[in-house]
Image (cartoon, rainbow, N blue to C red):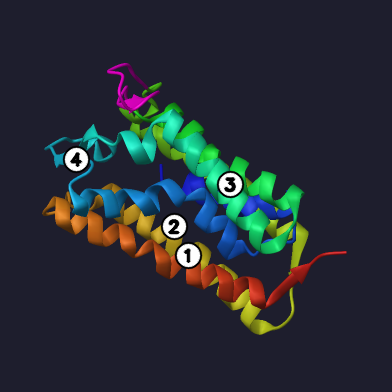
Amino acid sequence: MFIGHYGVGFAAKKWDKKPSLGTYFIACQFMDLLWPVFLLLGIEKVEIVHSNNPFLSLNFISYPYSHSLLGALFWSVLFGAIYFLIRKDMRSSIILGLVVISHWVLDFIVHIPDLQIIPWLSLRVGLGLWNSVVFTVIIEGLIFFIGFYLYLKSTKSKNKRGQIGLWSLIIFLSVIYVLNLIGPPPPSVQAIAYAGFSQWIIIIWAYWVNSNRTASS
């Protein structure tokens, strides 16, 4: 799942307007921000496979630390705790922690059984929505656009940059999603990892959008 996670990040501003949209984007993608680092360090492994289904072009051999349920719970608590130490806001910290763990919940829905519950156990789970490209696009698209709608209704632009920045971000995320669907598989595992770092562009973009928007009354 890709844009679905960002949908949760958008929706979270409806629950609590204090954290920046950029912070929510870090939270909703925190596990996927860790994963490229672990790939390059050789701690976790993935292989590229040939498939007519774009969602099944990667075989996640091992990612117990970034994407197991226990790992997700750890990162959720850690993220919330760090935010609390910085901001001293318990409510926002809890919500951010929940946004972090939402990543695993959404992955559990779409992934084939390749998600571990505990790193050192072989049991793997996943409901396998990815087996259907059509249903995956529908469900993920709904999560994304519902989240965006909630964000749009709970914030308003301070200026033109707040409008242009937000809509250009939506278009950019949508285009990237479509290109992932119709484009060729990645050329190498290293390319996957380096592409993962490009998510920071989206996060910085979200911080910029947030700085030009304010909460609706």
**SS assignment at label 3:** helix
Task: Give me the C-alpha separation between circle 2 and circle 4.
Answer: 25 Å
Looking at the rendering, which quadrant does residue 156 occupy?
bottom right
Looking at the rendering, which quadrant does residue 155 occupy?
bottom right
- In this figure, which residue is indicated by the disc labeled 2? 174
**SS assignment at label 2:** helix
Which residue occupies the foreground of this view, 99 or 121?
121
Which residue occupies the foreground of this view, 146 or 110?
110
**How many residues crowd around disc 3 within 10 Å: few (fewer than 14), some, or many (20 or more)?**
many
Give the dominant element type of the magenta stretch: helix, strand or loop: loop
Check whether the beta carbons of the residues at disc 1 and disc 3 lie within 8 A of each other.
Answer: no
Check whether the beta carbons of the residues at disc 2 and disc 4 lie within 8 A of each other.
Answer: no
- In this figure, which residue is indicated by the disc labeled 1? 171
Query: Residue furthest toward the right?
Result: 217
Q: Residue at x 40, y 21 (%)?
A: 127
**Span shown in magenta:** 112-125
Closest to the camera, between mark 2 and mark 3, is 3
Q: Earlier in the sequence, mark 1 or mark 3?
A: 3
Disc sitting over residue 46 in the figure: 4
Q: Earlier in the sequence, mark 4 or mark 3?
A: 3
**How many residues crowd around disc 2 within 10 Å: few (fewer than 14), some, or many (20 or more)?**
some
Q: Residue at x 65, y 63 (%)?
A: 86
Check whether the beta carbons of the residues at disc 2 and disc 1 lie within 8 A of each other.
Answer: yes
Question: Amino acid type of disc 4?
Answer: Val
User: Which percent across, then down, holds residue 66?
Assistant: 36, 41
Question: Amino acid type of disc 1?
Answer: Ile
Disc sitting over residue 8 in the figure: 3
Horizontal arrangement in the rendering, residue 177 relative to residue 93 (left or right): left
Question: Amino acid type of disc 3?
Answer: Val
**How many residues crowd around disc 4 within 10 Å: few (fewer than 14), some, or many (20 or more)?**
some
Task: Give me the C-alpha separation between circle 1 and circle 4.
Answer: 29 Å
